[in-house]
Amino acid sequence: MARRVVDVLVPVALDRAYSYRVPDKFDVAPGDIVCVPLGPREATAVVWAENPKPSPRLDNRLKEVEEKLDYPPLRPELRSFVEWVANYTLSSRGMVMRMCLRMGEHLPEERERVGVRLSGSAPRRVTPARQRVLNLLADGMARGKSEAAREAGVSTSVIDSLIDDGAVEAVALPPERVAEKPDPDFVQPEFTAAQPAAAAALKTTVAQGGFSVTLLDGVTGSGKTEVYFEAVADTIRAGRQALILMPEIALTAQFLDRFAARFGVRPAEWHSELSPRKRARTWAAVAKGDVPVVVGARSALFLPFADLGLIVVDEEHDPAYKQEDGVHYHARDMAVVRGHVAKIPVVLSSATPSVESEVNARRGRYARLALPERFGGQRLPSVEAIDLRRAPPPRGRFISPVLAEAVKTVLERREQALLFLNRRGYAPLTLCRCCGFRFSCPNCDAWLVDHRFRRHLVCHHCGFAMPHPPNCPKCGAQASFVACGPGAERLEEEVHVLFPDARVLVLSSDLVASVERMREEFADVAAGRFDIVIGTQLVAKGHHFPMLNLVGVVDADLGLSNGDPRAAERTFQLLHQVVGRAGRDAGVGHGLLQTHQPDHPVLRALIAQDREAFYNAEIDLRERTHYPPFGRLASIIVSGPDRHDTAAYAREIARAAPINENATQGVRVLGPAEAPLALIRGRHRMRLLIKAPRNYDLSAYLRRLLAKAPKRRGAIKLEIDVDPQSFL
Ligand code: ADP
Ligand code: ZN
């Protein structure tokens, strides 16, 4: 008799599920997480469907499901989501499903945690260090040993000596919880101005349930977070789970504290820097429904929530939501899809919505909740341009006298200034004064960036790094190198010259060792331990620095002229956000933009604080040119070690495009052309851009095109990016 067969999706780059026999020992159903033999190894996989009519030819050869793992099954809603994402992004279902399976198997047994508490007997000898430990433990609570040492500011040997002494005893602690339960009623916020109406509307949305998208559109500092916390609170009250997505996990330190201030405890976190153990425990707790709120980076979207009731996408416009390797997906767009599949509300929050979301709100497809004023009546910062053509900085410097004067004034008032320059390192280009030789990356089509702090020349695309050579590699001249252009580190030098007494901090992602360290630095800024902060885009987002009243943008033109169709939108959002860090608490915020083109529409809109003007112009342009959201785009990047072969193959792909369909449906295949970054990591890159009308099924078209394309040869790789954000 034929035995039952199921189709199992395995976590590899395969679209189809494999058939396995169900053994007699146990039963499985779709969604179950199982262990199956896969070639020479075993894989954790998911039962995807029953297979009622397996081919009889296969029957004897089929392998058996080895084991059913002790996890809750992946819910139908998550499985539909996987199907949807795979279909849309042209990724294999196996790779998308793999993003859901982050339970971390094969971790070693968890070690017992050792805690310490007072034993009740007095120590025989008391040193200042011992006293600090005794003070800390005076409340009678047990704490982890290393935690107690850290809090008391002593080494663990001091605690060991107190244990030997009998004053402190060691106890076994229960395993640390993933997160305590947030209390929706921990504090009742008092809302003002437009906040009560927005909060009430969100509460109604949550109460009604079902799929909806709300754009929470509030100026910087308007209290968007406080407002969407109400939706989170109601979701917790309803016993369901809420997911809050953040573009950059480093910015969450303040966020976690604000969450704790509202809900009594910090939420569970999900991001790439979690330890494997923490990740495993969080995953399991989310699946069991033990974790009411998760704050996470984009990958949190693939967590197996037991009962997801709400998704919030904070800073929804942020480009960091786009994943650009492996499965190319946009977490904001996919959050909307997951909300649709799960039939739950989605809240998108931003002061500078993406053009896509803005258009959806204007058309009424998304509900819009507006918070037009800052909390506490704080005024929005005033913004002015510094025309570098008229008031340039001194030779070899980058801070114009006007900006320097403004910084001086805030320092005299004992307030903070932020100098924003979205460029890591010391200088973007280094050349030889004698022969003009320029340092470029051997693997990429890019200059090496001088990182003096790390004492290396570094490629920002592949990570190649080399120490500064003493002589020019080409002409042999000694000490002949000149740094061209500014980077954050170079700006620091200039700031020290201009303001020798100021306490200066450079905040740049390459300078901090860990997320923890970065969080400490943000806290230091918020606490006023620095006078001038020099920051790359890391500082633009979400932070609340109460003493910061001046933001100087050192190069407002950077990013406007790179030929990217989203350059205007990106620059507007980034500069608006960074200027929005000023004047959030007390005093008057001020933004100064150093530019060579003060009449550029983006700069004019920023200066006039006329957001509508910017969106109107940008939407109009996109509509005329059929760019998203008025048309659809996908890109295909062909890369390979040999330039000629890569280009030849890219041309074959273009020829595989279904010509008839192109003409009748209005699809256009542009290129191939050499990508702006023509070489990365030793691979030559060609791009094709496919443009299609708005409601066209571009994914299906791409699938047809690829099916007709000749087989890939050798080491040539194809990357498909539906709705590309990057055009490099
Ligand atoms: P946004 O996210 O819109 O930029 P935030 O949510 O960061 O604004 O709010 C700005 C500041 O105002 C924060 O420090 C926040 O705690 C405070 N705030 C906003 N609304 C309230 C409120 N209703 N009660 C108390 N503080 C609030
Ligand atoms: Zn490189």
Image: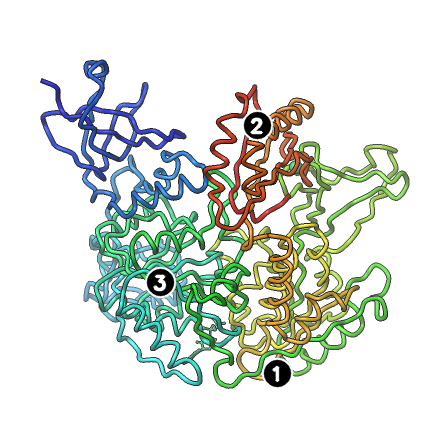
The x, y position of residue 361, in whole percent, is 47, 66
**What's the CA distance linking mark 1 and mark 3?**
38 Å
Q: Identify residue for label 3.
A: 212
Observer-side mark, 2 or 3, equals 2
> Mark 3: which amino acid?
Ser
Q: Is residue 353 visible?
A: yes
User: Are discs 1 and 3 less than 8 Å apart at CB?
Assistant: no
Residue displayed at 21% across by 42% down: 71
The x, y position of residue 194, in whole percent, is 44, 82
Quadrant in which the C terminus appears: top right
In screen coordinates, is 88 left or right of 410? left
**Depicted 658 relative to depicted 312: above or below:** above
The x, y position of residue 32, in whole percent, is 21, 38
> Mark 2: which amino acid?
Ala
Q: Nearer the viewer, residue 594 or 120?
A: 594
The x, y position of residue 614, in whole percent, is 63, 68
**Depicted 331 relative to depicted 48: above or below:** below
**Location of ligand 2 given as a quarter of the image:** top right
Q: Identify residue for label 2.
A: 656
Q: Secondary structure at mark 3?
A: strand
**What's the CA distance linking mark 2 and mark 3?**
40 Å
